[in-house]
């Protein structure tokens, strides 16, 4: 059990550090972006990015889980390489078709997405970006299947820094605003994706298997629905906000959502990137059920602690990083963070369906969750604006998580103990509410109080026995050994 936690923690930490470094750089750049871009520009970029994300999720993102699953189906390198090569060829073909269609219908698409057909150049650039993203998805998934977490993170960071340098040039020097951001992303994608693709082809060789493609599509087709549902739950509220409000409100909500989404970037995504590769090996071990259940409890603790930290500190963070017109974005952050606690649980529950290769029932789960989200958006956004959008997201993710749990339990039962997890989440909510009640005029005193409340979260859980004492003692010993190894702790002196 402890060895599995250490292995998951190692890779998840690498992925998480990559996301942290990326976000640190991104947050440092927020004053730059808010100086040169207006909320309306943020809204335009958000709608363009969401349109690209939706197309990618529906047409190619499902290949991610399918590649990792089929790579682990084979023990010999030849069949593994053939599966990867087949997916790469298929993804490239889809990318070419969609890119040509996007360029051909750029004007009507610009009118549909941005209400302005004269902005068709934005759609053309995003179409080329889609072709590169189809190749990038396969190459990165191949590295994840091989558990090459350091290389995945390194590639992402290089791409990030290239984009930032180009953004500074196009936005601050050439002053071309939204167009500059799109140019930056496209150029950095070319410089990263093409070498990755060449390297992947060299390693797997180009071979195509129609039989493997049938298996890949059979496994992945239901995930198209879940991908579309995930997009609906994550991002459809922007389009409803655009319809019922203004594009400036979309930009304000997008900024607040970005901070709430940090829970996904810091915890859910790093964990999921190694989790999808590890679940098949854990499933072959003894005591599979208790192992999964205990990992889930620790995972939810990390989710709740991170969400609490984001929610408590967000008002002070925004007051430092942004101009006053963006400060009200803090209101949506706690609700969005809660939504991603539910999303993290949902990603964990999917393990059972993946292991049993029973992905077909996940399609209805996605349809129900997406329909619920659309209904809640229509009901709540006209009345409550961006807060209605945030709550629609949280409720929808909660429903999706419950449905995924029910489906997975039918095909791969796991003895979860939800009373412990529910208690941890409720404690986090209680501490957050308490931090709002204790409003102080002194900023420094306010920070001290909030940090004290944050530290109380694990302390209270420890006092009520949430953590297993044996696991805590062994983890402490491992931590001390690591610190001694790197000279951060003095060696123990024998008595």
Image: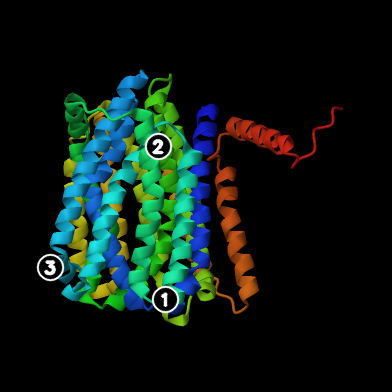
Q: How far apart are marks 3 and 2 (CA)?
A: 37 Å
**Which residue is more in the foreground, 382 or 129?**
129
Q: Which label belongs to residue 108?
A: 3
Residue underneath mark 1: 174
* Structural crowding at the residue carrying mark 2, measured as other residues with C-alpha within 10 Å and reported as few (<14), some (14–19) or many (≥20): few
Compared with residue 146, is residue 241 higher up or lower down, i.e. above or below? below
Q: Which label belongs to residue 199?
A: 2
Where residue 12 appears, as percent x and y from the top left, is 49, 41
**Which residue is more in the foreground, 195 or 492?**
195
**Which residue is more in the foreground, 209 or 23?**
209
Circles 1, 2 touching at the beta carbon (< 8 Å): no
Where residue 5 appears, as percent x and y from the top left, is 51, 33
Q: In the picture, which quadrant includes the C terminus?
A: top right
- Can residue 190 be spotted in the picture? yes
Q: What element carries label 1?
A: loop
Where residue 141 appears, as percent x and y from the top left, is 36, 38
Q: Is mark 2 on a helix, strand or loop?
A: helix
Give whichever of discs 1 and 2 has the lower sequence position. 1
Q: Quadrant of residue 108?
A: bottom left
Residue drawn at x 34%, y 45% as measured from the top left: 136
Residue drawn at x 37%, y 53% as measured from the top left: 189
Compared with residue 61, is residue 106 higher up or lower down, i.e. above or below? below
Residue drawn at x 37%, y 32% as measured from the top left: 202
* Structural crowding at the residue carrying mark 1, measured as other residues with C-alpha within 10 Å and reported as few (<14), some (14–19) or many (≥20): few
* Structural crowding at the residue carrying mark 3, measured as other residues with C-alpha within 10 Å and reported as few (<14), some (14–19) or many (≥20): some
Q: Distance between the residues labelled 1 and 2?
A: 34 Å
Q: Quadrant of residue 440?
A: bottom right
Where residue 92 appears, as percent x and y from the top left, is 24, 42
């Amino acid at each position: 059990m402890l060895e599995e936690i250490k292995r998951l923690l190692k890779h998840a930490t690498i992925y998480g550090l990559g996301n942290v470094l990326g976000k640190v750089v991104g947050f440092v750049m927020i004053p730059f972006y808010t100086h040169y871009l207006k909320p309306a520009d943020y809204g335009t970029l958000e709608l363009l990015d969401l349109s690209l994300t939706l197309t990618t999720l529906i047409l190619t993102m499902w290949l991610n889980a399918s590649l990792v699953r089929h790579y682990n189906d084979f023990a010999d390198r030849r069949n593994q390489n053939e599966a990867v090569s087949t997916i790469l060829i298929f993804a490239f073909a889809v990318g070419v078709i969609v890119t040509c269609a996007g360029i051909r219908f750029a004007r009507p698409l610009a009118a549909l997405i941005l209400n302005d057909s004269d902005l068709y150049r934005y759609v053309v650039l995003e179409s080329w970006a889609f072709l590169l993203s189809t190749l990038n998805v396969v190459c990165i998934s191949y590295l994840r299947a091989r558990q090459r977490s350091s290389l995945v993170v390194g590639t992402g960071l290089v791409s990030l820094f290239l984009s930032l340098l180009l953004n500074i040039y196009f936005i601050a020097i050439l002053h071309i605003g939204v167009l500059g951001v799109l140019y930056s992303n496209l150029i950095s994608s070319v410089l990263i994706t093409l070498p990755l693709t060449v390297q992947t082809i060299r390693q797997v060789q180009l071979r195509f298997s129609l039989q493997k493609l049938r298996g890949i599509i059979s496994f992945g087709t239901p995930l198209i629905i879940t991908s579309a549902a995930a997009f609906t739950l994550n991002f459809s509220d922007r389009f409803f906000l655009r319809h019922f409000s203004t594009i400036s409100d979309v930009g304000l909500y997008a900024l607040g959502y970005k901070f709430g989404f940090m829970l996904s970037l810091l915890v859910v995504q790093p964990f999921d990137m190694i989790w999808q590769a590890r679940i098949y090996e854990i499933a072959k071990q003894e005591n599979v059920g208790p192992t999964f259940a205990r990992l889930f409890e620790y995972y939810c603790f990390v989710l709740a602690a991170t969400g609490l930290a984001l929610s408590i500190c967000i008002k002070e963070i925004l007051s430092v990083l942004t101009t006053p017109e963006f400060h009200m974005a803090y209101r949506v952050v706690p609700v969005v963070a809660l939504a991603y606690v539910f999303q993290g649980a949902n990603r964990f529950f999917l393990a059972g369906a993946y292991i049993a290769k029973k992905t077909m029932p996940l399609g209805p789960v996605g349809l129900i969750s997406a329909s619920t989200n659309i209904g809640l958006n229509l009901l709540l956004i006209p009345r409550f604006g961006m807060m209605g959008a945030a709550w629609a997201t949280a409720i929808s993710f909660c429903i999706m998580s419950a449905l995924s749990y029910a489906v997975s339990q039918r095909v791969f039962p796991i003895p979860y103990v939800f009373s412990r997890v529910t208690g941890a989440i409720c404690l986090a909510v209680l501490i957050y509410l308490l931090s709002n009640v204790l409003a102080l005029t002194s900023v420094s005193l306010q920070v001290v109080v909030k940090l004290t409340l944050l530290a109380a979260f694990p302390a209270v859980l420890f006092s009520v026995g949430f953590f297993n004492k044996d696991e805590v003692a062994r983890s402490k010993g491992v931590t001390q050994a690591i610190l001694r190894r790197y000279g951060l702790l003095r060696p123990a002196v024998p008595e």
